[in-house]
Amino acid sequence: QVQLVESGGGLVQAGGSLSLSCAASGSISRPNVMGWYRQAPGKQRELVAHMTSGGNPHYADSVKGRFTISRDNAKNMVFLQMNSLKPEDTAVYSCNTHPLNGYSWSYWGQGTQVTVSS
């Protein structure tokens, strides 16, 4: 069983930066995708960014140019550097991994709170 554990959330003022980390325990088949989703109160969960095991990133339009995703495949880790944070970035951020093709399996972390004050 794969477990994902996130760290790095917190409270920051608008314009500030935060870094999130997600570590996966256990073996994850490749090729795969590791990424970050977020859910704000009263809103649906949305994709923030993901990256394939081959290193191809994808970002939501709302975070392009501000957030950077990276991976360490050897350690089964994914990171999210968040700069120029806005109050609308406030949400619970969750880590996810699934196969590159389809969702025959999918694992989620427990989530970490990111709060951006105005």
Image (cartoon, rainbow, N blue to C red):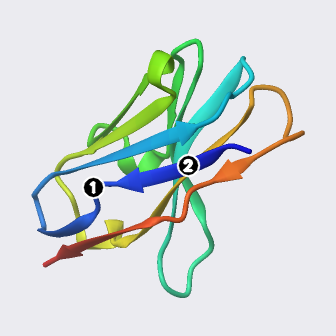
Farthest residue toward the bottom? 42
**Residue 90 position within the rendered picture, expressed as x and y whole percent measured from the top left:** 33, 72
Residue in the picture at 51% in, 28% down: 76
Residue shown at 23%/68% (left/top)? 10
Q: Is residue 66 left or right of residue 12?
A: right
In the image, residue 102 sits, relative to residue 10, either above or below, namely above
- Relative to 79, 37 lies left or right: right
Residue position marked by numbered label 2 in the rendering: 4
Residue at image location 64% in from the left, 34% down from the top: 26
**Mark 1 Cα-neighbour bin, 10 Å: few <14, some 14–19, many ≥20:** some
In the picture, the quarter occupied by the N terminus is top right
Residue at the right extreme?
Answer: 104
In the rendered image, the vertical position of residue 13 relative to residue 53, given as above or below? below
Task: Give how far apart the Cα atoms at labels 2 and 1 are.
Answer: 14 Å
Q: Mark number for residue 85?
A: none
- Residue on which the image places disc 1: 8
- Residue closer to the observer: 91 or 99: 99
Q: Position of residue 84 (x, y in %)?
A: 16, 52
Residue 49 at x, y percent in the picture: 49, 42
Going by the numbered disc 2, the residue's amino acid type is Leu
Count numbered badges in the picture. 2
The quadrant in which the C terminus is found is bottom left
Task: Name the residue type under label 1.
Answer: Gly
Q: Secondary structure at mark 2?
A: strand
Q: Does 98 sit left or right of 103 as displayed?
A: left
